[in-house]
Amino acid sequence: MTLPDLYLDEDTQSDALIAALRSRSINLLTTSEAGLAGRADEEQLRFAASGKRVIITSNIADFARLHTQWLHAGREHHGIILLHQQKWGPGELARRIIRLLADPPGKNMRNRIEFLSHVQA
């Protein structure tokens, strides 16, 4: 099963979540690894889109706004997954992320925004 590559925004970066995803052979990059820590949300989304990565963030309001702005401007991204911080442990988060990305229509996240809370474990 081939899943989209991921980009973890700095508000979702935890060593435990990174380890949980990578232990499941998920290709992911973090803002720290990309050298983009502290950069604006627009720049984070632009970077994720340029690398064809789905961005995962807890910054719900700002990324929901960016998603709408991008669509209205005719710009494309490769998906945004929104999650509430500390709602689940890293293993549960990883399972829900993988389920979202593995099940149709999650396999094609282009220009989509999804709340992880809508995904069953």
Image (cartoon, grey):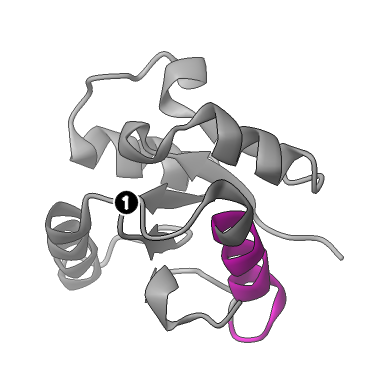
* Label 1 secondary element: loop
Q: Residue furthest right?
A: 1
Q: How far from the left and from the top, in percent, is residue 27? A: 71, 41
Disc 1 crowd rating (10 Å Cα; few below 14, some 14-19, many 20+) is few
Q: Is residue 36 magenta?
A: no
Res. 105 image quadrant: bottom right
- Residue 107 seen: no
Q: Quadrant of the N terminus?
A: bottom right
Magenta segment boundaries in residue numbering: 93-105
Rendered residue at 58%/34% (across/down): 16
Is residue 19 toward the left or the right of residue 79 in the image?
A: right
Q: How far from the left and from the top, in percent, is residue 98? A: 67, 64
Is residue 16 toward the left or the right of residue 70 in the image?
A: right
Q: Which residue is mark 1?
A: 85
| Three-letter code, disc 1 | Gln
Q: Residue furthest top?
A: 35
Total numbered circles: 1
Q: How far from the left and from the top, in percent, is residue 88? A: 46, 59
Which secondary structure class fits the magenta region best?
helix
Placement of 60 over or under 12, stated as above or below:
below
Res. 77 image quadrant: bottom left
Q: How far from the left and from the top, in percent, is residue 87? A: 37, 60
Rendered residue at 54%/58% (across/down): 93
Rendered residue at 68%/45% (across/down): 21
